[in-house]
Amino acid sequence: MAISWKTIPLHHKILAGLVLGALFGALFKVDKYELEISHAVGRTVEATVVSRWETVAFVRDTVVLETFGREDQLRILQAYRRLPKADREHLTVMVRSAQQESSPPLRIDNVRGIEKVKTIAMTIKPVGTIFIRLLMFIAIPLVLSSLIVGAASLGDIRRVGTLGGKTVLLYMVTITSAITIGLVLVNLIEPGTRLTADVLEKLKMEFQPDIQSAIPPIDLIDMVVNIVATNPINALANGEMLQIVFFALMIGISLTMVGEEKAGPVIRFFDGMSETMIKMVGMIMAIAPYGVFALISATVGEFGFDILETLVWYAVTLVLGLILHMVGFLGMLARFYSGIPFRKFFSGLREVMLVAFTTSSSGATLPVNMKACENNLGVPKKITSFVLPLGATINMDGTSMYQAVAAVFIAQVYQMDLGLAEQLTILLTAVLASIGTAPVPGVGIVMLIIVLRSVNVPEEGIALILGVDRLLDMCRTVLNVVGDAAVATIVAKSEGVLGEQGKG
Ligand code: ASP
């Protein structure tokens, strides 16, 4: 039988996009010894590519601001970004090349920008960005409408309370198990004691200054207060997930109290809205293989896998924990509690996992997850529309495990001994941090600060793990969404409404 592109199942196409994208990115990797410097010449801006330098110096007037060596591409980019405006506007870059050491250095005046030289692997990124944006624009209206309908269709506030309580309790159980697995592994493997002094120095030099400017003030009490929006429209406009969840639940609950005549049209409106959003996912997923290809090729092309080598033990500890929790805990829960065979559970979530991995965003993956849970695992819409948006916002098994592992790893590097009490504190704050983490790329590392502060581990330690964070974010997001799906099947089963699709 002839195989045509149309007959290949979507998840195979996405997987092909992933693998080919990674290869493409590796093939057209950004050169670590090359930089593009744009500079004003008269009234136009020109670009000069410099490569294989011996030294690069930032000069303002005749003062040398900073000098860099051969291996310092990243430091040059970061130092440029951090330059005070006045220096940046009058910057000259002097480049001494390795080949012609005796000749005078190349002088580039009126510098306007310094960037890595983009390869084709990075220039195709917009295709992937459009894919993520399409999923993101569904996410907010979907969370709002499906949670309103989800809560309203439960009938009365007591049912919302029971189902909500059960869901939240299950989320806490999966998060706690994830953190515990992470803590056990990081204490056994001790990745923080396996770093060489060289690597440590390099990581600190490259990422330290970024951290100082990135650490925002975080206050737990404020976080709780902030769940209540003063203006829900603002919350929607700014994508404040916790505020949106709270707002939607309040509307849903109130709708159960105003009587059918008034509530009916409102519920039908939001129901139609959520149905429409889910329909849209089907269309968007048609471009998923191309979006995934572009996203992965850009990530691999820009960051490569080299950085993982420096932190290999840390990465291994985390990835091992993620796999253990996913297969050993969530897979087993779905198997023994919900009665969904192991293979069925994971094959039903194939697309979901691939999208989570490539987009690093459980928010963007939510619509795909809702569709997969309904169609492949037999969770009815009335459960997915309540459990999954809530889970995407508060339940992050992967992120909380990562926060615990990272905190202990950093403590190990700083040779701090964390006792049982401290590890319990980590567990507790990682649960809270997971609730407060927005379901978008890279927020987990910001919320890690809460965990570090709770046990007095230096925040600057984040510098050590910043370089690998993008890649590990992809991995932890997969666990975040699989955790939500597993809980959705359990809630459906416990309510006696799990359909046949998930059975073997
Ligand atoms: N990227 C994660 C998510 O969206 C959050 C994080 O850990 O940064 O689920």
Image: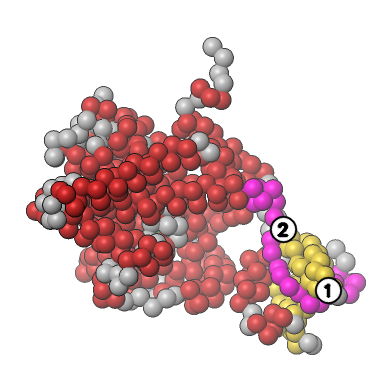
Viewer-nearest of discs 1 and 2: 1
Q: Quadrant of residue 86?
A: bottom right
Rendering colour mode: secondary structure
Residue at the bottom extreme? 62
Quarter placement of the N terminus = top right
Q: Secondary structure at mark 2?
A: loop
Q: Quadrant of residue 368?
A: top left
Amino acid under label 2?
Answer: Val
Residue 43 image label: 1
Residue 73 drawn at (x, y percent): 67, 65
Q: Is residue 387 visible?
A: no
Q: Is residue 139 visible?
A: yes
Amino acid under label 1?
Answer: Arg
Residue 281 drawn at (x, y percent): 43, 41
Q: Is residue 382 magenta?
A: no
Residue 148 drawn at (x, y percent): 25, 52
Residue 117 image label: 2
Task: Say above or below: 194 vs 453.
Answer: above
Residue at the front extreme? 261
Q: Quadrant of residue 268?
A: top left
Task: Say above or below: 437 vs 280.
Answer: below
Task: Say above or below: 32 vs 413.
Answer: above
Chain part drawn in magenta? 101-125
**Residue at 32% across, 70% down:** 231
Q: Residues within 10 Å of mark 2 (few under 14, many from 20)?
A: many
Task: Say above or below: 475 vs 410.
Answer: above
Q: Earlier in the sequence, mark 1 or mark 2?
A: 1
Residue 310 image label: none
Looking at this view, is 482 or 242 the one in front? 242
